[in-house]
Amino acid sequence: MIDFRYHLVSLIAVFLAVALGIVIGTTQLNGPLTDNLQGQVTALQEDKRSLEDQTQQLQTQLDDVGSFEEAVGPTLVENTLTGRSVVLVVAGADPEPDVAEGLTALLGSAGATVTGTVRLTDGYAAESTADTLETFLSGPGVPLTVTQPETDDPGEAVASVLAQLLMVPAEGSARVAPTATDTATVLAGLEELDVLSQDSTSVTPADLAVVLTTGALEGDDAETRTSALLQLAVALDEQGSGAVVAGNLASAGDGGLVAALRADSAARGTVSTVDNVTAAAGRISTVLALAAEARGTSGEYGVGEDTQPVPAPVS
């Protein structure tokens, strides 16, 4: 009869055999496996270096193109906006400093005068400021020359009032042109409500407007605020001689203002959009789009789907 010790010795022998097999197998395979893995690592490192070199070359080419566009930009836009005035409205996150600076310089090359920059805060048309904003808009701080819209939508209301005070009426309009004092008074009131800020002590009415935007708004009321910005862009266009909304490529994506305008069949027919204002070509497009707006032509420009690279200058 087989006793317990026999079973124990048999089990130990089996485990020793298994362990010895693993050791021998590992020893035999260790060299080839290690060599193979090392070869793969080396190949990946070489691929990485090659891709880095290609990236660097492409970046250099992009820099060269950007430098060329920066150089020829003033010539391309020269005299396209002679005698015109433009107000800048920054909606959402601030763009890179060189965007506004480069655009302002190009507008000067085009013969236009920039009358100031208004920066909308997160409080613009936000649900948290709706009541105080409604009270201000219906109060004595808004001049009697401003036509109050018949609406319960605070976004539409502030868009209408702000547009009337920022824009010089287009030729043939029956609207009374705002005075610099009226514009300054309302902007100061909205600044007190933390709805907007001004880059200078004086922002005066202009013929045309550029709304600068980046990416998409965030927060629970982002959709409402984006809708309010769309209403403002349309109102600026209606009250003046034209408006262009210029943003980065992200602004043409989900939740972005450029995307919202392009998706709105009515707005896209009146307000021009540019989706690459962070590039020199986009800033050139923005200036030329303003010139086209002044002639009554709207379009979608940039690098996104179904866009034109750049609007044609006046022949």
Image (spheres, rainbow, N blue to C red):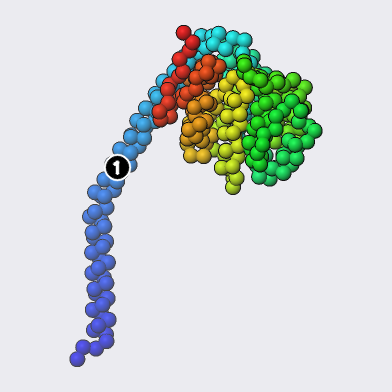
Amino acid on which disc 1 is placed? Gln
In-image side of 310 versus 87 (left or right): left
Residue 159 in the image, given as x and y percentages of width and height: 64, 32
Task: Decide: is 273 above or below 313.
Answer: below
For mark 1, what is the residue?
40
Which residue: 70% across, 19% down?
Answer: 177
Residue 226 in the image, given as x and y percentages of width and height: 57, 38
Dot 1: few (<14), some (14–19), or many (≥20) neighbours within 10 Å?
Answer: few
Residue 32 in the image, given as x and y percentages of width and height: 24, 49
Which residue: 73% across, 35% down?
Answer: 137
Res. 234 image quadrant: top right
In-image side of 70 versus 307 (left or right): right
In-image side of 222 versus 279 (left or right): right
Which residue: 45% across, 19% down?
Answer: 310
Q: Residue furthest bottom?
A: 1
Which residue: 24% across, 54% down?
Answer: 29
> In terms of secondary structure, where does tag 1 sit?
helix
Residue 72 in view: no
